[in-house]
Image (cartoon, rainbow, N blue to C red):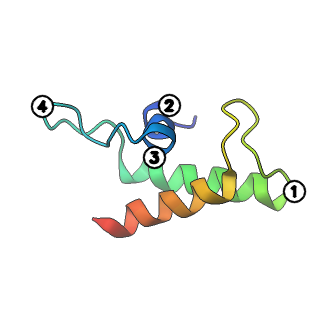
Amino acid sequence: MLCRLMQFDFMDGTGRFDDTGAELYSDNDLQFGRQYALDYLATGVTIEPMMKFDLAAFADWCESQLNHG
């Protein structure tokens, strides 16, 4: 399942860590999110069906977050 907290970070910049420094989502979530987006894109779907965000931008964001740390 696609992590909602990660989606909120992508859409609203809420952050990967909470106020105490606890991690809200992992690299595994980012890898899953990237593949989730790429799988939809491969079928011609460009907008996430439920949350309505750009899947290509999301895949790029997930990859950039993985390469950031």
Q: Quadrant of the N terminus?
A: top right
Q: Residue furthest left?
A: 20
* Residue at (50% x, 31% y) in the render: 4
Q: Which mark is residue 44?
A: 1
Determine the CA span between mark 4 and mark 1. Answer: 40 Å
Foreground tag (3 vs 4):
4
Report the side of 12 relative to 45 (left or right). left
Residue at image mark 2: 4
Residue at image mark 4: 20
Q: Earlier in the sequence, mark 3 or mark 2?
A: 2
Q: Residue furthest bottom?
A: 67
Determine the CA span between mark 1 and mark 3. Answer: 23 Å
Residue 49 coordinates in the image, percent (x, y): 76, 35
Determine the CA span between mark 1 and mark 2. Answer: 23 Å
Report crowding for label 3: few under 14, some 14 to 19, many 20 or more residues within 10 A (C-alpha). Answer: some
Report crowding for label 4: few under 14, some 14 to 19, many 20 or more residues within 10 A (C-alpha). Answer: few
Tag 3: amino acid: Asp
The answer to whether 53 is drawn above or below residue 63 in the figure is above
For residue 15, which quarter of the picture? top left
Residue at image mark 3: 29
Residue 37 coordinates in the image, percent (x, y): 67, 53
Q: Earlier in the sequence, mark 1 or mark 3?
A: 3
Determine the CA span between mark 3 and mark 4. Answer: 20 Å
Q: Earlier in the sequence, mark 3 or mark 4?
A: 4
Tag 1: amino acid: Gly
Tag 2: amino acid: Arg
Tag 4: amino acid: Thr
Mark 2 secondary-structure assignment:
helix
**Quick one: 68 or 14, which is closer to the camera?**
14
